[in-house]
Amino acid sequence: NRRFVLAERPRGVPDDNTLRLKTVDIPEPGAGQMLLRNVYLSLDPYMRGRMSDAPSYAEPVNLGEVMVGGTVAKVVRSDVDGFAPGDWVSAFGGWQDYALSDGAGVINMGKSPENPSWALGVLGMPGLTAWSGLTQIGQPEAGETVVVAGASGPVGATVGQIGKILGCHVVGIAGGPEKCAHVTETLGFDACIDYKAERFPDALKAAVPDGIDIYFENVGGAVFDAVMPCLNTLARIPVCGLISQYNATSLPKGPDRLSLLMGMILRKRMTLRGFIVFDDFGHLYPDFARQMGDWVKQGRIHYREEMIDGLERAPEAFVGLLEGRAFGKRVIRLDA
Ligand code: NDP
Protein backbone atom coordinates (compact mmCIF):
# COMPACT_ATOMS: atom_id res chain seq x y z
CA ASN A 1 0.00 0.00 0.00
CA ARG A 2 1.83 3.07 -1.28
CA ARG A 3 0.82 6.57 -0.31
CA PHE A 4 2.05 10.13 -0.71
CA VAL A 5 2.24 12.10 2.52
CA LEU A 6 2.82 15.82 2.80
CA ALA A 7 6.44 16.09 3.94
CA GLU A 8 7.00 19.84 3.71
CA ARG A 9 4.86 22.89 2.94
CA PRO A 10 5.98 24.29 -0.44
CA ARG A 11 6.97 27.86 -0.98
CA GLY A 12 6.11 28.66 -4.60
CA VAL A 13 6.07 25.64 -6.91
CA PRO A 14 5.92 22.26 -5.07
CA ASP A 15 9.24 20.38 -5.44
CA ASP A 16 10.78 16.98 -4.68
CA ASN A 17 10.66 17.66 -0.94
CA THR A 18 6.94 18.49 -0.83
CA LEU A 19 5.53 14.96 -0.97
CA ARG A 20 7.11 11.69 0.16
CA LEU A 21 6.15 8.21 -1.08
CA LYS A 22 5.71 5.77 1.82
CA THR A 23 4.83 2.09 1.90
CA VAL A 24 2.55 0.97 4.72
CA ASP A 25 0.36 -2.06 5.50
CA ILE A 26 -3.03 -2.33 3.86
CA PRO A 27 -5.42 -1.08 6.56
CA GLU A 28 -8.00 -3.39 8.19
CA PRO A 29 -11.58 -2.08 7.99
CA GLY A 30 -13.30 -1.99 11.38
CA ALA A 31 -17.01 -2.13 12.23
CA GLY A 32 -18.97 0.28 9.99
CA GLN A 33 -16.06 0.70 7.60
CA MET A 34 -15.08 -0.47 4.12
CA LEU A 35 -11.75 -0.99 2.38
CA LEU A 36 -11.43 0.74 -0.98
CA ARG A 37 -8.87 -0.02 -3.71
CA ASN A 38 -8.25 3.28 -5.48
CA VAL A 39 -8.21 2.90 -9.26
CA TYR A 40 -8.24 6.54 -10.44
CA LEU A 41 -6.94 9.60 -8.60
CA SER A 42 -8.08 13.06 -9.63
CA LEU A 43 -5.53 15.88 -9.81
CA ASP A 44 -7.10 19.27 -9.11
CA PRO A 45 -5.75 22.81 -8.66
CA TYR A 46 -7.29 23.14 -5.16
CA MET A 47 -4.72 20.61 -3.88
CA ARG A 48 -2.11 23.37 -3.97
CA GLY A 49 -4.17 25.21 -1.33
CA ARG A 50 -4.31 22.12 0.91
CA MET A 51 -0.50 21.91 0.90
CA SER A 52 -0.33 25.39 2.38
CA ASP A 53 -1.29 26.55 5.86
CA ALA A 54 -2.32 30.01 4.63
CA PRO A 55 -5.91 30.87 5.62
CA SER A 56 -8.40 29.12 3.33
CA TYR A 57 -11.93 27.76 3.17
CA ALA A 58 -10.71 24.27 4.14
CA GLU A 59 -8.21 22.88 6.65
CA PRO A 60 -4.74 22.18 5.25
CA VAL A 61 -3.34 18.66 5.12
CA ASN A 62 -1.18 18.16 8.21
CA LEU A 63 2.49 17.35 7.73
CA GLY A 64 2.95 13.56 7.61
CA GLU A 65 -0.65 12.95 6.54
CA VAL A 66 -1.83 11.43 3.26
CA MET A 67 -2.39 14.02 0.53
CA VAL A 68 -6.13 14.43 -0.04
CA GLY A 69 -7.80 13.80 -3.37
CA GLY A 70 -10.93 12.61 -5.12
CA THR A 71 -10.80 8.98 -6.24
CA VAL A 72 -12.74 6.36 -8.11
CA ALA A 73 -12.26 3.05 -6.33
CA LYS A 74 -13.51 -0.51 -6.02
CA VAL A 75 -14.88 -1.86 -2.77
CA VAL A 76 -12.69 -4.72 -1.50
CA ARG A 77 -14.45 -5.50 1.82
CA SER A 78 -17.41 -3.76 3.36
CA ASP A 79 -19.28 -3.41 6.62
CA VAL A 80 -21.19 -0.37 5.33
CA ASP A 81 -24.83 -0.69 4.28
CA GLY A 82 -25.35 -0.19 0.56
CA PHE A 83 -21.75 -1.06 -0.42
CA ALA A 84 -20.62 -4.55 -1.46
CA PRO A 85 -17.31 -5.96 -2.72
CA GLY A 86 -16.90 -5.26 -6.42
CA ASP A 87 -18.93 -2.02 -6.38
CA TRP A 88 -17.34 0.99 -8.05
CA VAL A 89 -17.51 4.13 -5.95
CA SER A 90 -16.55 7.76 -6.19
CA ALA A 91 -14.90 8.77 -2.94
CA PHE A 92 -12.28 10.94 -1.38
CA GLY A 93 -9.59 8.29 -0.94
CA GLY A 94 -6.46 10.43 -1.30
CA TRP A 95 -3.09 9.84 -2.96
CA GLN A 96 -2.75 6.17 -2.01
CA ASP A 97 -3.48 2.61 -3.18
CA TYR A 98 -5.98 1.72 -0.45
CA ALA A 99 -8.29 3.81 1.73
CA LEU A 100 -10.74 3.18 4.56
CA SER A 101 -14.17 4.82 4.47
CA ASP A 102 -17.32 4.89 6.57
CA GLY A 103 -19.37 5.67 3.46
CA ALA A 104 -19.84 9.40 4.19
CA GLY A 105 -19.82 11.36 0.92
CA VAL A 106 -19.21 8.19 -1.09
CA ILE A 107 -21.35 7.57 -4.19
CA ASN A 108 -22.02 3.99 -5.29
CA MET A 109 -21.66 3.71 -9.08
CA GLY A 110 -22.66 0.04 -9.31
CA LYS A 111 -20.80 -2.99 -10.66
CA SER A 112 -20.04 -1.85 -14.21
CA PRO A 113 -20.32 1.89 -14.76
CA GLU A 114 -19.50 3.27 -18.18
CA ASN A 115 -16.32 5.43 -18.08
CA PRO A 116 -15.88 5.26 -14.26
CA SER A 117 -13.13 7.91 -14.26
CA TRP A 118 -15.54 10.52 -15.64
CA ALA A 119 -16.95 10.78 -12.12
CA LEU A 120 -13.79 12.79 -11.36
CA GLY A 121 -14.47 15.24 -14.18
CA VAL A 122 -17.46 16.17 -16.26
CA LEU A 123 -19.85 14.03 -14.19
CA GLY A 124 -18.30 14.96 -10.84
CA MET A 125 -16.82 17.90 -8.95
CA PRO A 126 -15.47 19.93 -11.92
CA GLY A 127 -18.70 19.39 -13.87
CA LEU A 128 -20.82 20.49 -10.92
CA THR A 129 -18.54 23.52 -10.51
CA ALA A 130 -19.06 24.56 -14.13
CA TRP A 131 -22.79 23.95 -14.19
CA SER A 132 -23.63 25.50 -10.84
CA GLY A 133 -21.30 28.51 -11.14
CA LEU A 134 -22.62 29.33 -14.60
CA THR A 135 -26.34 28.75 -14.00
CA GLN A 136 -26.63 29.97 -10.39
CA ILE A 137 -24.28 32.98 -10.45
CA GLY A 138 -23.87 33.67 -14.16
CA GLN A 139 -27.59 33.22 -14.89
CA PRO A 140 -27.06 33.25 -18.65
CA GLU A 141 -29.76 34.22 -21.09
CA ALA A 142 -29.82 33.29 -24.77
CA GLY A 143 -27.96 35.84 -26.87
CA GLU A 144 -25.64 36.97 -24.07
CA THR A 145 -21.86 36.76 -24.34
CA VAL A 146 -20.04 34.37 -22.01
CA VAL A 147 -16.26 34.40 -21.69
CA VAL A 148 -14.46 31.65 -19.80
CA ALA A 149 -10.75 31.34 -19.05
CA GLY A 150 -8.98 28.00 -18.68
CA ALA A 151 -11.22 27.02 -21.57
CA SER A 152 -9.62 23.66 -22.39
CA GLY A 153 -9.66 22.43 -18.77
CA PRO A 154 -12.44 20.36 -17.21
CA VAL A 155 -14.27 23.32 -15.65
CA GLY A 156 -13.81 25.84 -18.48
CA ALA A 157 -14.62 23.38 -21.28
CA THR A 158 -17.86 22.45 -19.55
CA VAL A 159 -18.84 26.07 -18.82
CA GLY A 160 -18.51 27.03 -22.48
CA GLN A 161 -20.38 24.01 -23.81
CA ILE A 162 -23.27 24.64 -21.40
CA GLY A 163 -23.24 28.28 -22.53
CA LYS A 164 -23.66 27.11 -26.13
CA ILE A 165 -26.52 24.76 -25.19
CA LEU A 166 -28.22 27.74 -23.50
CA GLY A 167 -27.90 29.85 -26.66
CA CYS A 168 -25.06 32.19 -25.66
CA HIS A 169 -22.18 33.57 -27.70
CA VAL A 170 -19.21 31.81 -26.07
CA VAL A 171 -15.57 32.85 -26.18
CA GLY A 172 -12.83 30.82 -24.50
CA ILE A 173 -9.38 31.91 -23.37
CA ALA A 174 -6.62 29.29 -23.39
CA GLY A 175 -2.85 28.95 -23.69
CA GLY A 176 -1.54 28.15 -27.17
CA PRO A 177 -2.89 27.38 -30.66
CA GLU A 178 -3.43 23.65 -30.05
CA LYS A 179 -5.72 24.18 -27.06
CA CYS A 180 -7.54 27.00 -28.84
CA ALA A 181 -8.18 24.82 -31.91
CA HIS A 182 -9.64 22.12 -29.65
CA VAL A 183 -11.88 24.67 -27.93
CA THR A 184 -13.43 25.91 -31.17
CA GLU A 185 -13.32 22.80 -33.36
CA THR A 186 -14.18 20.05 -30.87
CA LEU A 187 -15.96 21.91 -28.09
CA GLY A 188 -17.85 24.24 -30.44
CA PHE A 189 -17.09 27.59 -28.80
CA ASP A 190 -17.61 30.56 -31.13
CA ALA A 191 -14.01 31.71 -30.64
CA CYS A 192 -10.97 31.03 -28.48
CA ILE A 193 -8.24 33.56 -27.76
CA ASP A 194 -4.66 32.56 -26.93
CA TYR A 195 -3.65 34.60 -23.88
CA LYS A 196 0.03 33.82 -24.52
CA ALA A 197 -0.07 35.41 -28.01
CA GLU A 198 0.92 39.01 -28.64
CA ARG A 199 -1.85 41.59 -28.54
CA PHE A 200 -4.09 39.23 -26.57
CA PRO A 201 -6.22 42.07 -25.10
CA ASP A 202 -6.98 43.40 -28.61
CA ALA A 203 -7.87 39.94 -29.90
CA LEU A 204 -10.22 39.41 -26.95
CA LYS A 205 -11.89 42.74 -27.51
CA ALA A 206 -12.46 41.93 -31.19
CA ALA A 207 -14.04 38.57 -30.28
CA VAL A 208 -16.70 40.18 -28.06
CA PRO A 209 -18.24 42.93 -30.22
CA ASP A 210 -21.21 43.21 -27.83
CA GLY A 211 -19.04 43.19 -24.69
CA ILE A 212 -19.03 40.52 -21.98
CA ASP A 213 -22.17 39.74 -19.96
CA ILE A 214 -20.72 36.83 -18.00
CA TYR A 215 -17.06 36.27 -17.25
CA PHE A 216 -16.44 32.89 -15.59
CA GLU A 217 -13.15 33.46 -13.74
CA ASN A 218 -10.79 30.48 -13.47
CA VAL A 219 -7.36 32.07 -13.69
CA GLY A 220 -7.07 35.72 -12.57
CA GLY A 221 -3.92 37.79 -13.15
CA ALA A 222 -3.19 39.22 -16.60
CA VAL A 223 -6.22 37.48 -18.13
CA PHE A 224 -8.59 39.36 -15.84
CA ASP A 225 -6.81 42.63 -16.68
CA ALA A 226 -7.71 42.08 -20.34
CA VAL A 227 -11.30 41.11 -19.56
CA MET A 228 -12.04 44.11 -17.33
CA PRO A 229 -12.48 46.80 -20.01
CA CYS A 230 -14.89 44.57 -21.99
CA LEU A 231 -17.35 43.94 -19.15
CA ASN A 232 -20.91 45.18 -19.75
CA THR A 233 -23.27 46.95 -17.37
CA LEU A 234 -24.87 44.34 -15.09
CA ALA A 235 -22.13 41.80 -15.90
CA ARG A 236 -21.98 38.72 -13.66
CA ILE A 237 -18.64 37.24 -12.66
CA PRO A 238 -18.65 33.84 -10.96
CA VAL A 239 -15.23 33.83 -9.26
CA CYS A 240 -14.36 30.15 -9.38
CA GLY A 241 -10.56 30.00 -9.36
CA LEU A 242 -7.38 32.05 -9.68
CA ILE A 243 -4.94 29.42 -10.85
CA SER A 244 -2.38 31.95 -12.14
CA GLN A 245 -1.80 32.95 -8.50
CA TYR A 246 -1.67 29.56 -6.72
CA ASN A 247 2.13 29.26 -6.77
CA ALA A 248 2.71 33.01 -6.30
CA THR A 249 4.75 34.18 -3.34
CA SER A 250 3.97 37.89 -3.73
CA LEU A 251 1.33 40.17 -5.24
CA PRO A 252 1.49 40.61 -9.03
CA LYS A 253 3.65 43.45 -10.34
CA GLY A 254 2.24 46.68 -11.70
CA PRO A 255 0.07 49.51 -10.45
CA ASP A 256 -2.66 48.73 -7.92
CA ARG A 257 -5.87 48.33 -9.94
CA LEU A 258 -8.20 47.75 -7.02
CA SER A 259 -9.82 51.19 -7.04
CA LEU A 260 -10.31 50.91 -10.82
CA LEU A 261 -12.13 47.62 -10.27
CA MET A 262 -14.24 48.97 -7.40
CA GLY A 263 -15.23 51.96 -9.55
CA MET A 264 -16.31 49.62 -12.34
CA ILE A 265 -18.32 47.43 -10.01
CA LEU A 266 -20.18 50.54 -8.87
CA ARG A 267 -20.73 52.25 -12.20
CA LYS A 268 -21.55 49.13 -14.16
CA ARG A 269 -23.51 47.56 -11.29
CA MET A 270 -21.59 44.32 -11.71
CA THR A 271 -21.93 41.21 -9.55
CA LEU A 272 -18.77 39.36 -8.53
CA ARG A 273 -19.44 36.32 -6.43
CA GLY A 274 -16.95 33.76 -5.27
CA PHE A 275 -18.15 30.23 -4.58
CA ILE A 276 -16.89 26.96 -3.17
CA VAL A 277 -18.71 24.27 -5.05
CA PHE A 278 -19.84 21.82 -2.36
CA ASP A 279 -20.44 24.51 0.29
CA ASP A 280 -22.62 26.63 -1.98
CA PHE A 281 -24.13 24.22 -4.48
CA GLY A 282 -23.65 20.68 -3.14
CA HIS A 283 -27.41 20.45 -2.60
CA LEU A 284 -27.90 20.79 -6.37
CA TYR A 285 -25.88 17.65 -7.12
CA PRO A 286 -28.91 15.45 -8.02
CA ASP A 287 -30.23 18.06 -10.49
CA PHE A 288 -26.77 18.43 -11.98
CA ALA A 289 -26.21 14.68 -12.27
CA ARG A 290 -29.49 14.17 -14.12
CA GLN A 291 -28.96 17.08 -16.52
CA MET A 292 -25.28 16.48 -17.24
CA GLY A 293 -25.82 12.72 -17.53
CA ASP A 294 -28.38 13.40 -20.28
CA TRP A 295 -26.18 15.90 -22.11
CA VAL A 296 -23.19 13.58 -22.06
CA LYS A 297 -25.29 10.62 -23.26
CA GLN A 298 -26.72 12.75 -26.07
CA GLY A 299 -23.20 13.74 -27.14
CA ARG A 300 -23.91 17.41 -26.46
CA ILE A 301 -21.03 17.77 -24.00
CA HIS A 302 -17.58 16.60 -25.05
CA TYR A 303 -15.03 15.56 -22.42
CA ARG A 304 -11.27 15.28 -22.76
CA GLU A 305 -9.23 13.28 -20.28
CA GLU A 306 -5.47 12.94 -19.89
CA MET A 307 -4.75 9.61 -18.25
CA ILE A 308 -1.33 9.18 -16.58
CA ASP A 309 -0.23 5.75 -15.35
CA GLY A 310 1.31 5.18 -11.93
CA LEU A 311 0.83 6.76 -8.52
CA GLU A 312 4.55 7.63 -8.45
CA ARG A 313 4.00 10.09 -11.31
CA ALA A 314 1.33 12.08 -9.46
CA PRO A 315 3.57 14.82 -7.97
CA GLU A 316 5.16 15.72 -11.30
CA ALA A 317 1.78 15.54 -13.07
CA PHE A 318 0.32 17.85 -10.44
CA VAL A 319 2.99 20.51 -10.90
CA GLY A 320 2.43 20.24 -14.67
CA LEU A 321 -1.28 20.92 -14.09
CA LEU A 322 -0.50 24.15 -12.25
CA GLU A 323 1.93 25.20 -14.97
CA GLY A 324 -0.43 24.72 -17.92
CA ARG A 325 0.93 21.39 -19.20
CA ALA A 326 -2.39 19.58 -18.72
CA PHE A 327 -4.63 19.32 -21.77
CA GLY A 328 -7.95 18.10 -20.46
CA LYS A 329 -8.72 16.54 -17.10
CA ARG A 330 -5.60 15.00 -15.51
CA VAL A 331 -6.25 11.64 -13.87
CA ILE A 332 -3.74 9.20 -12.39
CA ARG A 333 -4.48 5.52 -13.10
CA LEU A 334 -3.18 3.39 -10.26
CA ASP A 335 -1.82 -0.03 -11.20
CA ALA A 336 -4.65 -1.82 -9.41
P1 NDP B 1 -7.63 23.25 -15.31
O1 NDP B 1 -7.23 21.95 -15.87
O2 NDP B 1 -8.38 24.18 -16.19
O3 NDP B 1 -6.37 24.00 -14.73
C1 NDP B 1 -5.18 23.96 -15.34
C2 NDP B 1 -5.14 24.99 -16.46
O4 NDP B 1 -5.08 26.31 -15.93
C3 NDP B 1 -3.90 24.83 -17.24
O5 NDP B 1 -4.01 23.81 -18.21
C4 NDP B 1 -3.72 26.21 -17.85
O6 NDP B 1 -4.40 26.25 -19.07
C5 NDP B 1 -4.44 27.14 -16.88
N1 NDP B 1 -3.42 28.01 -16.26
C6 NDP B 1 -2.41 27.65 -15.45
N2 NDP B 1 -1.66 28.73 -15.13
C7 NDP B 1 -2.23 29.77 -15.76
C8 NDP B 1 -1.90 31.16 -15.83
N3 NDP B 1 -0.84 31.67 -15.21
N4 NDP B 1 -2.69 31.96 -16.56
C9 NDP B 1 -3.76 31.47 -17.22
N5 NDP B 1 -4.11 30.16 -17.20
C10 NDP B 1 -3.34 29.33 -16.47
O7 NDP B 1 -8.39 23.05 -13.93
P2 NDP B 1 -9.89 22.86 -13.54
O8 NDP B 1 -10.75 22.93 -14.74
O9 NDP B 1 -9.94 21.69 -12.67
O10 NDP B 1 -10.15 24.13 -12.64
C11 NDP B 1 -10.28 25.42 -13.21
C12 NDP B 1 -10.32 26.47 -12.10
O11 NDP B 1 -11.47 26.25 -11.29
C13 NDP B 1 -9.12 26.44 -11.16
O12 NDP B 1 -8.76 27.76 -10.84
C14 NDP B 1 -9.66 25.74 -9.93
O13 NDP B 1 -8.98 26.10 -8.76
C15 NDP B 1 -11.09 26.22 -9.92
N6 NDP B 1 -12.04 25.37 -9.21
C16 NDP B 1 -12.81 25.96 -8.25
C17 NDP B 1 -13.76 25.27 -7.57
C18 NDP B 1 -14.60 25.98 -6.58
O14 NDP B 1 -15.35 25.34 -5.84
N7 NDP B 1 -14.54 27.29 -6.50
C19 NDP B 1 -13.96 23.84 -7.81
C20 NDP B 1 -13.13 23.29 -8.89
C21 NDP B 1 -12.20 24.06 -9.55
P3 NDP B 1 -3.73 27.01 -20.31
O15 NDP B 1 -2.71 26.12 -20.91
O16 NDP B 1 -4.87 27.30 -21.17
O17 NDP B 1 -3.07 28.22 -19.71
Image (cartoon, rainbow, N blue to C red):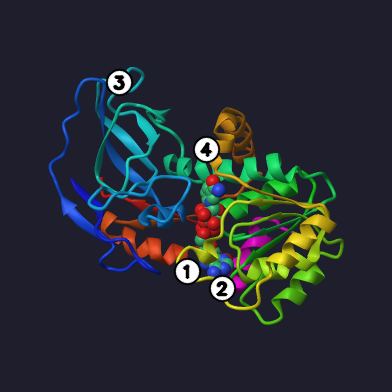
Badge 3 crowding class, 10 Å Cα cut-off, few under 14, some 14 to 19, many 20 or more, is some
Residue 169 lies, in percent from the top left, at 79, 55
> Which residue is tagged 3?
80
> Which residue is tagged 4?
278
State which region is magenta: 176-189
CB atoms at circles 1 and 2 under 8 Å apart?
yes
Q: Main secondary structure of the magenta part?
A: helix
Badge 2 crowding class, 10 Å Cα cut-off, few under 14, some 14 to 19, many 20 or more, is few
Residue 70 lies, in percent from the top left, at 40, 43
> Which residue is tagged 2?
252
Q: Is residue 215 left or right of residue 239?
A: right
> Which residue is tagged 1?
248
Q: Sequence-wise, which precedes: disc 4 or disc 1? A: 1
Q: Sequence-wise, which precedes: disc 4 or disc 3? A: 3
For the residues labelled 3 and 1, the Cα–Cα distance comes to: 43 Å
Any part of residue 299 in sight: no
SS assignment at label 1: loop
